[in-house]
Image (cartoon, helix red, strand yellow):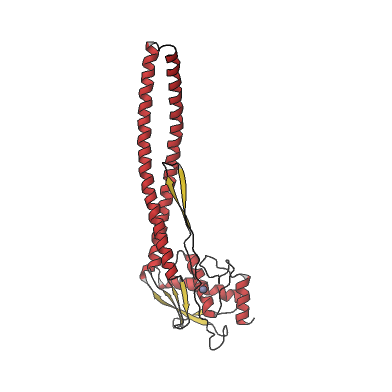
Amino acid sequence: MDKRKGILANLILLTLGIVAVVHILPSNGTFSLKNLIARISGPCTSPIEYRVGQIDPRFNISASTFLTDIDQAANIWNSSYGKTLFTYNSEGELAVNLVYDSRQTLDTQINNLQSNVQNQKGNLDQQISQYESLVVSFNSKVSDFENQIKYWNSRGGAPPDVYSQLIQQQKNLSQEANKLNLMAAQLNQSTVSYNTQVGTLNQTINEFNTALSLKPEEGLYDPKTDSINIYFTSSQPELIHMLAHELGHALGLQHNPNNQSIMYPYATNTQTPTQDDLRALKTLCGK
Ligand SMILES: [Zn+2]
């Protein structure tokens, strides 16, 4: 099954005062190719026996944990059908493997970058709004000060005590302006670094989507070798969904277009078969 990354990453353009949104839209995926073979004995007559095959250590998952996930995926079908369609056997024919490739690396990178970018954006938004409210208050002080100057100029000058007070006000305003400018410079710098991160994130997503377009299957059932290969996974619910999906193929089920279905061609987290899934199961198994 396939999965494309479609995420929104925000670029902060501080100088323009515009928050631009960079959309990486998912492009059209291709359906994973499935050669369906009817088992010699006919589908669903005797349980398919699965075993844990090879696990690439980079997945950082133990064989027993992986088996628990496969059991859970198998039980989705077993309990829906009310009969054992899949069962574990350490010598079983159907090997379920975790095969590591570059997409898992990219996926991990993307997750890390995404959380960095989100944190930075939260901090920046807060600092920018603080800065903006300080600027508003500063501008009102400046306009107040200018009105006082105009007033005294129209009277041909201020008396000495007022004059020295105005000079002091001017010094304070100038100090405040310096502080604000320093803040703005720091914010600009933070924004540049944030935008760079967003650029890296979007580039990594592009690489990921390119890798996916060359090799769209996140998981694959291969009828020739009678094995299921899982290439990468973002989360445990997604892994269980993918395992259930590929087990469905091993049984002989085909894709259906309902996006809530286990046999929907794209990876999701759903773990409950839809009516479409169940109908296909009944047609296949004849119940
Ligand atoms: Zn599929």
Q: With respect to residue 41, does 211 lie above or below?
A: above
Q: Nearer the viewer, residue 127 or 7?
A: 7
Residue at 43% across, 51% down: 118
Give the tally of numbered discs.
0
- Looking at the picture, how far across and down is residue 124, in whole percent? 42, 44
Q: Quadrant of the C terminus?
A: bottom right
Instruction: Find residue 250 and report its horizontal and vertical position in percent.
Output: 51, 79
Give the quadrant of residue 262: bottom right
Measured as percent of width and height from the top left, residue 167 is found at: 36, 19
Which residue is drawn at the image coordinates 42% and 36% (left, top)? Answer: 131
* Residue that extends furthest to the right in the rendered view of this protein: 287
The residue nearer to you, when weighing 88 against 30, is 30
Between residues 260 and 69, which one lies in front from this camera angle?
Answer: 260
Side of 141 where 42 appears, left or right: right
On the picture, is 84 further left or further right than 187? Answer: right
**Is 37 rendered above or below residue 12?**
below
Residue 254 percent location from the top left of the image: 56, 76
Residue sticking out furthest to the bottom: 40
The residue sitting at 44% across, 14% down in the picture is 154
Q: Is residue 168 left or right of residue 250?
A: left
